[in-house]
Image (spheres, rainbow, N blue to C red):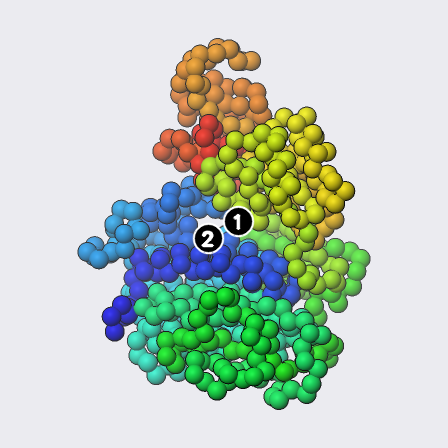
Amino acid sequence: MPGVADALDGTALLNWGRHALTALERHRDEINALNVFPVADSDTGTNLLSTMRAAVRGAEAAIGTPYGGRVADRESAAQMEALRLQVGATDMATPTSPDRDPTIADHRAVSAHGVMAAMARAATMGARGNSGIILSQVLRGVADAVANGPLTAEALRFALRRAARLVREALSSPVEGTMLTILDRAAERAADASEGDLLGVALAAADGAVKALGETPAQLGVLREAGVVDAGARGLLVLLDELVAAAGGSAPARPVYRRGAPEERPSRVPDRPATDVSVISEGSAAADRSDFGTDGSGGGAEYPAGAARSGEAASNPIAPVPNPGAVLPTSVVRPAGEPAPRSEWGSGAPHYEVMFLVRASDELRIGELRDQLGALGDSVVVVGDGEETWSAHVHCGDAGAAVEAGLAAGVLSGIRIEILDDSGHTPTGKADRAILAVASGTGAVRLFEDAGAVVLEGAVTADVLLEAVRRVPQREVLVLPNGALPAHELVAVSVAARDGQREVLMLPCGSMVQGLAALSMHDAGRAAADDAFAMSEAAAGTRWGALRVAPERSLTMVGMCEAGDGLGLVGHDVVVIDSDVRAAGRTLLDRMLGLGGELVTMLLGGDAPEGLSDDLTAHVAAGFPGVEVVVYPGGQAGDLVQIGVE
């Protein structure tokens, strides 16, 4: 069949990852809206997107082919070099092919295992949330399957079986009706597929996954109560559909899965059990049922305007749609062994999501860590990348005890602790609050947008900022000015923007690196004042500086500089002058880290000289052991690099 691939090599797998990343971005809001288990915090889509982005950029960096000049989100240049060494330089290259995809900048062919091993490792290190860690194991399963060649039909069968096993082994208490169930069904359908080619097996896996997705409410009470399918499982289906496209088919058309309000459903006895599903293809009798709403409202899923309702003949079935006449129960008797939703934990003490990376450990100690975390809380996942690094995740009431358990297992890094919403309230939509951030540079704008902020670009005046605030439809607006305007102008804008219907809070962010630190603490579940306080505290806890080139001869507070000199600033004050720009950057880091610090964030400017981030990262590693360095592509003008120290 023309265009159908018998196997996917490293180039094709990297492109699959890129297309999956784009698809996850497209479906992020849909997946977030479905998120009710294990915590109804509407972030599963965002977590999957962030993890996949880390995976793709990790692979790009490992093979030396950055896509669009980007630097991996949560990986420094030094970490990327370590990744290249761990994957193995010889594993990255295969004989050159004349029909290579042109998106690979240097046109070197790369092996399937080299790409997937890099993706799996980067996903493990950059995983966000429970769903992100599980995604990392799906990628690891594919990496293991292509150890000796490209992804073929048989390799895909092995990959899905391997991933399903890795995920179940990683969970302290596997719960059906989630990502692991969908992965099991996809593996089973792939194994039973009569087609012998890669496309046939990929289609079978996607068909198995979509059927299992429609059945998740019957397996998990909290999904049944909310009238949704599992959010993480929906995200996994996105990846499988993109794999169908990568194999030469067309990604199957899927409805938009949405929250179904039980009270809005017809209050009549259903024709079939509530857990029954239909697979509707063009021309089928079910497609013309009179009780199927024209807007798709009958099935917990709706098709976007203009979306095709058919696949390729009978090969690409539409996603299963729950019976339109089914009445979802408003109360559920929870089966034995099924976890209670977060709302049943009870109020009082806060609960936390704790994640960290573990190195210098072994399988015995990791097994003990998994048991200890299981005793502390739930949603426990501990996975490895196959390269002696493990990622751990738990929801618990004692974050300190979780970290102590990790310390007993090995050397920790990347510790992240977030407060979970324990209100018992399941969000019915987005909070009526927006984050408006001032940013410049393509990479920086993307970072703020990916984190959910509305971005104001270009030259910013008080009038421009005021108009931007007024255009935001939300009632509460938190503004990250990021040094664009002086304080007195920000106060004037804030006062002018308040009209009795809108609350506007200006956060004290003097630079984009402070703005990113603040945005990492944003929680729409909190009251606006509490959210603003937490974000402001994060910004204030980030010392910031910048490396620039002097445009002309001038007098600074530390002496005279000449045009072309490197200037190191802390805040708005010049503290370093050096004729060597790189030396100025190293001295600036020494000054900023002299007061202590655990994390250095670098936002690279559009005019940063080649190798600058490598040089500065190596300097931190040599002079300040244990300090983590994160490099982002900013693309901003003026500053060669903005530096934040937390």
Who is closer to the viewer here, 77 or 108? 108
Q: Which label sits in the foreground, 2 or 1?
A: 1
Name the residue at the left extreme: 98
* In this rendering, position of residue 169 left or right of residue 96: right
Tag shown at residue 53: 2
Name the residue at the right extreme: 348
Residues at discs 2 and 1 in contact (Cβ within 8 Å)? yes
Mark 1 Cα shell of 10 Å, populated few (<14), some (14-19), many (≥20): some
Quarter of the picture holding the C terminus: top right
Q: Is residue 71 above or below residue 26?
A: above
Who is closer to the viewer here, 396 or 277? 277
For the point 33% across and 73% down, which residue is it? 199
Q: Secondary structure at mark 1?
A: helix
For the point 60% across and 65% down, which residue is it? 34
For the point 25% across and 51% down, which residue is it? 108
Tag shown at residue 450: 1
**Residue 373 coordinates in the image, percent (x, y):** 64, 61
Who is closer to the viewer here, 61 or 234? 234
Residue 513 seen in this snapshot: no
* In this rendering, position of residue 473 left or right of residue 108: right
Mark 2 Cα shell of 10 Å, populated few (<14), some (14-19), many (≥20): many
Residue kind at label 2, given as amino acid type = Arg
Residue kind at label 1, given as amino acid type = Asp
